[in-house]
Image (tube, grey):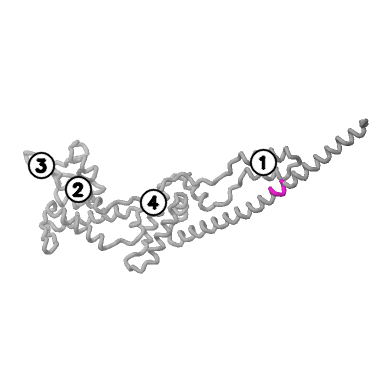
Amino acid sequence: MVTGTVMAGAFFGNLADTMKENREYLKAKQGMLQDYMLKAGFEERAKLKEARAERAKLLDEADKLGIDEEAAAVLYSTGQLSSTVGYLKKIEQSEDPDKKINKAGLKRFSEAIVASVPEEKLGAAMKYAFELGAAEDPSSEKLVEAIHATSLDEYDEAISAFMNTSPTTRVAPNISPFDINKRALVDLDLTDIGSARKNMERQLAAQLGGQYNAREDKVTFANPQAADRIIDRAESEYIKQVTDPITSRSPNVVIDEIVNKVVSLVGTEGLQLNDIAAVDFFSTMPTPIVTDSENNTAEQDLTKTGSSIQDVIEQGYVD
């Protein structure tokens, strides 16, 4: 007959063996977890170091090219900084003497980018670009708890929490990509400007009282002073629109709209060529002088006539 003392000894002996096995099992699992964290930590640090180096290099290149720091941060946030820097470097390295980075245009570009972003998003972009680093992962705390667990239950609980926690990720501020106009970043193509002027001059020859000589490709105006002034303003407007930093437009569409604008003004009752030439008609409305049946003259306020031509003039083009 087995005595109670023998039975108790056997029970506690088995319990001690089980506890020893559990401790060894726990120790083994914690050791493997430490190895995993060490390896993962080195890999994460390597990736982080590489990302930081690439980001720092990109921002440094943008600065050297002349892109404002805040504009660079915004473009980095939209994912457009790399392609913009790449394009500018290509222009910088070009052997074409007519292709040069326009420093003044680049300054306008930077200003337009910054001005189009709300202040709070601008701050978020600066932080995202210049404070890029390894975001602390809250789930890693659970791995540390598992390593220091004193029982299998504590270990299992910490590991379970780790598996159910999504790692934190950095998110770029919600800024929509820009319609970057590359024409605005380089020196003006004088050949393009000359061609555009010739095009508008030919199209407006009849409206501005001129005769076009196809053989000589030349327009002769009856009132050259007024006509040339109008063409000058049309050319300036063309340059302004095709070099808008963050709006890309087809040169042909811009020319059509400018020509239609001038045509609408020439067709306005009470406006003479000299009246049109006297003001910047793309921003200021020339005042028509209307003569009634008794030969009395009066200034016509087109903003109060409700005429269809006023609608056309306000739009700036004729359909």
Amino acid on which disc 2 is placed: Asn
Mark 4 and mark 2 residues within 8 Å of each other at the beta carbon: no
Amino acid on which disc 4 is placed: Ala
Task: State the residue position of label 1.
Answer: 159
Under circle 2, the secondary element is helix
Amino acid on which disc 1 is placed: Ile
Task: State the residue position of label 4.
Answer: 112
Q: Earlier in the sequence, mark 1 or mark 2?
A: 1
Q: Earlier in the sequence, mark 2 or mark 3?
A: 2
Report the side of 235 relative to 29 (left or right): left
Under circle 1, the secondary element is helix
| Residue 30 magenta | yes
Quarter containing the N terminus: top right
Magenta range is 29-33
Task: State the residue position of label 2.
Answer: 260
- CA gap, disc 2 and disc 3: 25 Å
Under circle 4, the secondary element is helix
Residue 47 placement: quadrant: bottom right
For the residue carrying disc 1, how many other residues have a C-alpha within 10 Å: few (<14), some (14-19), or many (20+)? some
